[in-house]
Image: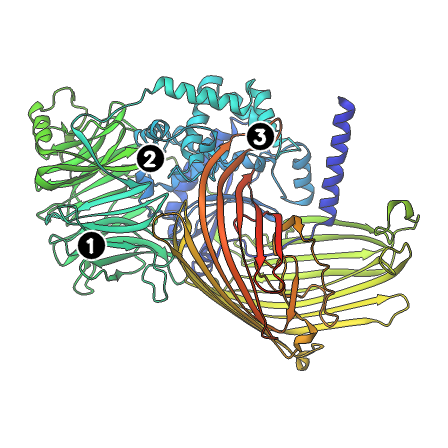
Amino acid sequence: MNGWRNRVWRAWVMALVLVLSGCAVSNGPRFSPELQQSFAREDMRRMDTEHLSLYYPAHRKAQTERIAAQLELCLNELNAKVVRDGPWERVPIFLPEVEFNNAYVSFSPGNDPHVLLPTSLTSGAFAGFGFTPSMLAVGCHEMVHWVHMTRVHGLYGGLNRVFGTWLTPHSGLDSWVFEGIATYYESKLVDDVGRHGSPVWENIFLAGMYEGELDGGRLSVFDREVANGGHYLVGSHFVAFLVERYGEEKLWQLLDLQGRSWLFPVGVTTRFWWVYGKGLPGLFEDFANEMRRQHPPRERALSQKRERWLGRNAQLEVSPSGRWATYVSGLDARAAIEVYEASGERVLRRELPDVLPGRTVVAGSSVDALRLSDDGQMLYMLVRHQGLDAPRSSLMRLDVASGDLEVVRDEVMGISGDLLGEDAYLLARAEGDQVVFERVDLEGESDRELFRLEPGAFVAHVRVSPDGQKIALTLMEDERWRVAVLDAQSGALLQALGTGEAHSPAYDAYWVDATTLWVSAAYGDRVDIFEMPLDGEAVRLTQAPYLAQSARPGASGDLRFLNREGWGWSLDRVDAQALERARASGTAGLDGALAWDDAAGAPEVRGYRELEPVPIQSDAPYSAFDGLFVPRLRLPIVQLGVVNALLPEADRQDLPPVNGRLGLALSGRDALGFHNWALSGAYDVVNDWWVGSASYVNTQLAPLTWSIFVGSDRQVFGEQIEPGSTDLRRVEQLDEQVSLQVQRSFYDIPIALSFSGLRHHIDREGEARDERQLVGPRLATGYAAGRGTSYGGTQWLFALSGAGAYYGEALGSDLDLGDVRAQLEVHTPLPLSKRHRLRFSARYRQLLGVDPSEGVLRVGGFGSMIPFFASPALEDALPADDRLPPQVAFVESLRGFEGVTLTGARAAIGDLNYRYPLIVDQGVISGPMVLPSAFFSQINLEAFASGAILDDGNLHLAAGGSVDAQFYLWILPMTLRYQYARWLTDGGRHTHYVGLNISGDL
């Protein structure tokens, strides 16, 4: 056994040495364009505490100090839990001023681990799953990731210290481990703040467990059924089960074991077995059984009636006119706003985002704060979508009669809001960790600020009373969720409604009239809707099985609301008679669980709990030299090559190496990623020459990025004199390259301009030198906008792309060559099913300045597909054009003609493709023995027809079908395809192939 382990160990170490020694360092921007833009435009500073380095906008100093105080506490508490200390370094934390609505920890080669926390969060999703959107709490979630991912010991700990931050064995764990642990600890590190333990979060899980499905596949990040992400929702409950049954120490022992493992992508379930005495499948089965034992299924009360299923995500709004509106999306439903008459007749459906040019809603949209005007003719909303340079929120108005959508105010950093009479809108917007209330003039531009809350007092569900004098809202202050009633002009706290318990929220209030609210509140083990007079006591109106919210009046005095069902929402109602019976029963059984505090007795709008400031060791303006000259990645170059590698083993000669490179590859950047550089250099000790490269990427003008690359590579190899011969000749090859590139996106439309030069030399024994050179500019852009569903994929799509390049003799090229390419792609859904779609693509490619007989343009090939089997056998590839550098090729794919190559100088290509997906969405938490997790997503049934016309005017047509199996092994997306095609021209050949694509969907 020990001998076997030693052999495997030596093989793994050898593989690592080969990977390390052969690696080139990559170079690129450290952050995405919107983040780089924020850092470039703001007056950035660096604040150092004992364990943190915080990079922040100067005007957010007070907020940064609060974040530092909380994160120091969280970090110290987490560091006390780890099995072994270190490595101890300051945590770099970056605070961009952008509507990013996300936070993360990054750990990747050449990019030092770091934490990103935006200064504001505006998305209503946080309130939707019971999480106070405080950057202090979010930051502690990220601190769990930091401590988890950076505790690397053993082999990889040594490699990281020597070569720079390269990898972490923790990347071998599935996402549910990362997010499950971090979500579990949210409420532990900042008392009762966070999702786990919130009645909202708990009931979302329980509803899905019974009316959905609970198995290992629900933990997968690739599962589409769990709206909030099964790796967060199910993962946090599974982690809690492990802690409660086996103790917290076992969890950290597991992370320590993973952090010093060397075969980290495999054997994860074995490491669980070593720590817990059971593998992952057995542990999850115990968890599922325990959850079902502790939480028996619940049924709707007899008074609660289901009207319809809405979707995985849903919002509900109603106007005094009786019209009501929803914003819904689902597994088989594209995101859309729908407006209905009181009778239930739908009068409008408006899908988002927009597809055709001239878009109002651009890419990646989400909607909050639906508000109908009193007459039901106008629907106001906050839409989060892509702006010119960065994500943004816009206050928009939808005309129900015409369907026209217009932007009222743009880039508002909106959280929530409501109509303030007929001519104004009350907007709650984020400004750092403060909420500012503004009166937006709907008839002009006379906007003005009304008031602002204390830092750390976050809000959601803002509603203005019918008389316009008061505001009811969800007030979230760390662990305390209350319904607060404020004066609409001054913001003074008038009343506060709460349960009196931490992590037991009262939220989502709606004015029934000027003196009465309907609110959602935790009661017992579920969340129900209560009627709450401003001067009276609570009456429980629903007995929902899990969670009821968004209470709205329905027709004939009914109560309509969102009811949690399975992994999504249904629209339910309680009729007027049942409501009267509930009111008649009064407060019986409530025992004051939900009660008002008046203005005198209500706790003030506190904001954050008081934190003891941490000592600031330094606080200075940011310097672009911060870490600039420190190599973040340091890799040795050790390469040996021999001339006889192509020969059969029996005929190989005992020849010495002909390449012997020794060198070093380095990369670095300043902390904010304005200046990014990479250098590599190696000396060939056998041939007495140098090779190397240098690159530089600049983001100071973000979102515009420019870069330059210069490099040369020279090597010797053996080439068979003729196929099958055992005689070799020596070949020397020299490749030189220089390139300059500028790129920027406008909205989601990229534009890239580059100028490159390639020079290729080959010296073969007995032949004249072969020299090729290609020099010229290239411009490329593209437009793509679409809508789709989780199961059906992209169903509406309109995409245009174009590129042009010129490689001229006047610029130094060996030939005058122009390259023009254009493509149109359209997707459309079809009737009878919500899942199938039709795709049409048209492409045109022309090479100017070359003769068609030279065959420079090639049509056909497998593209990214790796073929395992093809019938008939693949035709031999055509030799490369001897005037082009070998790394340059002009290729277009043609479905049905994968095994052959058509040549010419221009091609017009059309594709028509029908797809119907058979959804599987099943996974295993780990594979057999030591194999990682796997998730089977779907089977795609496709029928296609394709055709191309080249220079000769002949039509090449094919039609056929394919079956694709889409699945994931660990984190690798794969598609296995069997395809049959028949040529409708060119002799009518029948072709089959089986192939694998490792980049996901095709």
* Number of marks drawn: 3
Q: Tell me which label, 1 or 3, sits earlier in the chain.
A: 1
**Furthest residue to the front?**
987
Kind of residue at badge 3? Gly
How many C-alpha atoms fall within 10 Å of the one at disc 1: few (<14), some, or many (≥20)?
Answer: many
Whole-angstrom CA distance, mark 1 to mark 3, is 50 Å
Question: Residue 726, located in which quarter of the rendered image?
Answer: bottom right
**Circle on res. 610:** 2
**Pair 1/2: label in front:** 1
State the residue in front, 377 or 447. Answer: 377
Mark 3 or mark 2: name the one nearer the start of the chain: 2
Q: Is residue 624 left or right of residue 915?
A: right
Left-right relation of 504 to 376 = right
Residue closer to the observer: 117 or 530: 530
| Residue 437 vs residue 999, the one in the foreground | 999
Mark number displayed over residue 927: 3
Could you tell me which quadrant the N terminus lies in? Answer: top right
The disc labelled 2 sits on which kind of residue?
Glu
Provide the residue designation for mark 1.
379
In space, the residues marked 3 and 2 are separated at their CA atoms by: 48 Å
> Which residue shows up at 23% across the image and 28% down it?
544
Q: Amino acid at mark 1?
A: Leu
Q: With respect to residue 573, does 112 lie above or below?
A: below
Circle 1 SS class: strand
State the image coordinates of residue 38 (x, y, percent, origin top left).
Answer: 43, 57
Are there few (<14), some (14-19), or many (20+) residues within 10 Å of tag 2? Answer: few
Colour pattern: rainbow
Residue 322 coordinates in the image, percent (x, y): 12, 47
